[in-house]
Image (tube, grey):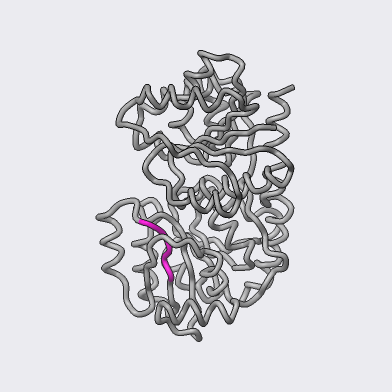
Amino acid sequence: MKIMHICQFLGVGGLEKVLYSLIKEQIKFGHQVEVVVYDYDRRWVEKYQKDLGVKVHTSYTKKDGYDFKLLSFLRQITKKQDIIHTHDLNPMLYIGILKILNPKLNIVHTTHGMEHLDTHPKTRIYEIFLGIIAQCIIVVSPKFKEYYQNQLLTNKKKVHLINNGTEIAPNIRNISDHAERVSVFEEFELDTKTPTAIYVARVVPLKAQHEIMQAFKEINHQLIIVGPSGNDSYYEQCESLQDKKIIMTNGRSDITRLLKASDYYISPSLHEGLPIAVLEAGAQGLPCLLNNIPGHNTFNTSKKCVLIYNNTAELVNYSSEILKEKNELNKNFFELITNKYSSKVMAKEYISQYKGILC
């Protein structure tokens, strides 16, 4: 099967990590995969090319506004593909037009996030167009599925929930990797004997880094904030809260190394679909302390897999409790990820949807 994934950006974020894992599994299954990225943020292009050996089309850069030359570029490179897989809204505004011009194109779309509905209300109209044109709409959370199933002119039968997936470590671990810990803590001048939390996310108000950094002023733990700026003024506000035990690293390509060095994962995020960063932490055997939002609560089913806090007072208390409960949390979450949220499970479900369209 010839599969082409189309993204506006290929930076360092949740979408890019999910897509990386998906493509890796698709190649293992014997499919031919290519990627298109057409806007300025291409930080993970080299990683995709080097690690996966996948062809990434980067020869065209989108102009401001609706770019008709981009439409022409995409028309040329999508002709011989079995499946065109768009990721998030912008690519679908171009591929959807190509589908009208060439009804034989097979279009699968994944919505990884829906923050744009609130920040740019006119995108609700674009989503209606997407709902009409895409043959299959993949969503990563029940909330997203509900949105499309209630959307005007969208056929409910074409909307499918596929959980984000991550690669999992061969064996669960119960303590941080000592060698990695020494290396990382020397780099950041942290104390190896002090419990340390890590948070990985783009630095924007929605991810609430400022709030968590303030909270850690009251906690006798260290905190590593990993992620590039998505809002420069907000990033500067967060930087002002750094001290000897609360640090910011900006964007990093060695996330797994940093996770292995840490004692637990924390997320104060105010909104998530299905957070891939939390899955990555759990897959590395890190206990997770998470803010009470639907995307985080998804992980607590019949067994307690993560620890949920409701406010700063609970956060302060639970930062000690999570280390006491880590063995049970690690075991339960690792089992859940293996059975439901692994990249292999995710890839099989995507391939099933592709085949359904081709048949």
Q: Is residue 187 visible?
A: yes
Residue 47 image point, x, y percent: 52, 53
**Front position in the image: 69 or 348:** 69
Residue 157 image point, x, y percent: 65, 23
Q: Quadrant of residue 215?
A: bottom left
Q: Quadrant of residue 245?
A: bottom left
Does residue 223 lie above or below 167 as drawn?
below
Residue 111 image point, x, y percent: 52, 36
- Magenta portion: prevailing SS class: strand
User: Relative to residue 136, is residue 75 drawn left or right?
Assistant: left
User: Relative to residue 251, is residue 165 drawn left or right?
Assistant: right
**Front position in the image: 136 or 24:** 24
Does residue 278 lie above or below 358 as drawn?
below
- At horizontal 26% and vertical 61% (from top left) the residue drawn is 236
Q: In which quadrant will I find the C terminus?
A: top right
- At horizontal 67% and vertical 59% (from top left) the residue drawn is 168
**Front position in the image: 8 or 221:** 8
Provide the residue span drawn in magenta.
224-228
225 in the magenta segment? yes
Does residue 97 lie above or below 353 as drawn?
above
- At horizontal 68% and vertical 47% (from top left) the residue drawn is 25
Q: Quadrant of residue 22?
A: top right
Residue 147 image point, x, y percent: 52, 31
Does residue 172 lie above or below 135 as drawn?
below
Q: In which quadrant will I find the N terminus?
A: top right
Q: Is residue 114 visible?
A: no
User: Relative to residue 139, is residue 123 drawn left or right?
Assistant: left
**Front position in the image: 19 or 162:** 19
- At horizontal 59% and vertical 25% (from top left) the residue drawn is 107
